[in-house]
Image: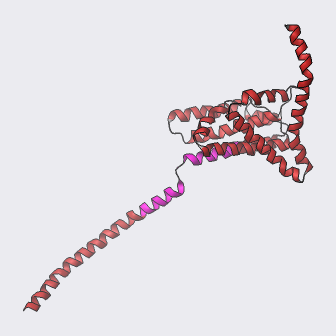
Amino acid sequence: SACAGGVAALLLSPAFAAATRSLLALLALPAQLWSGGGAGAVLSPLLGAACGAGLKMASLLGYYHAAVLPLILLEMEGGAFSVLGALDASCLCCACAGVCAAVAARPTSAEEGSACRRALAINIWFGDFVEACYPYMARDGYVRAAALCGAALGGAFVLPAAARSSAYLPIPIATAVCDAPLPFAAACASAFLVPFVGTLLRRMPPLAAWGLLSGLSDAKDAAGPSRRRMSLSRSSSCHSELPFSAAADQRHQH
């Protein structure tokens, strides 16, 4: 069996080497378009955004371990960091951290707040547990859209710069070891902030409507005493006129 395994590896290694070269060329394409200028400078971030959102959706649908992780390992076969690893850290870990941070800031229960704080810490300090935000994305279309937009924005920074890093590391360390730290830091920050703000706004009361209603309520409360004073003045004036009209009627009778 060992001999058969060696023969199979010998036969398949050229195919895997060709697949690795094709994958690396495909991942390098957005950076080449970016450096070429012109229309490529516009197309490159769009490709990056599509890859970031697609990676997030693939993970959401359960294809991370079946498809994404093998591609990351294939890209990292020489021991170097990878573009897909940078996309993993920014578009998956940081986007999930943004959702969990917003839920932890405005939890519906103490248990929910505790669970999301733990998920936030794992994503930031261990680069893992990206599925923690998926129940919130599944329940709320606005949260899902915010997370996908954050992932797309992160991809738009990573791929044009061909930034190479890895998940399963603390995000600060993943940024420090990246060969393009500034674009990667921008990708992580944007992938975190967009779902954080979107989820936080979704969990807050409608501020404009709340302010309008409270303003109307305050106006009613302020107008209440004046209305009561006006009604009292009307009633008192009516009572004062009644004796006067009665006396006038008596004078007419006389």
In the rendered picture of this protein, how many numbered marks are placed on residues?
A: 0
* Residue 245 appears in the figure: yes
Q: Position of residue 214 (x, y in %)?
A: 45, 58
* Residue 189 appears in the figure: no
In the image, taking residue 158 as reference, residue 198 lies left or right, namely left
Which of the 4 image quadrants contains residue 10?
top right
> Which contiguous range is marked in magenta?
191-218
Instruction: Name the one closer to the observer, 172 or 183.
Output: 183
Please say if 161 is above or below 39: above
Extreme residue toward the left, this view: 254
Looking at the picture, the colour scheme in use is: secondary structure
In the image, taking residue 177 as reference, residue 102 lies left or right, namely left
Q: Is residue 134 magenta?
A: no
Q: Position of residue 91 (x, y in %)?
A: 73, 39
Instruction: Name the one closer to the observer, 170 or 71.
Output: 71
Q: Is residue 193 magenta?
A: yes
Give the residue displayed 46% in from the left and 59% down from the top.
Answer: 213
Q: Position of residue 212 (x, y in %)?
A: 49, 60
Give the residue displayed 78% in from the left and 32% down from the top.
Answer: 166
Can you say which quadrant of the picture contains the N terminus? top right
Main SS of the magenta segment? Answer: helix
Please say if 209 is above or below 7: below
Q: Position of residue 136 (x, y in %)?
A: 59, 38
Give the residue displayed 65% in from the left and 32% down from the top.
Answer: 131
Can you say which quadrant of the picture contains the C terminus? bottom left
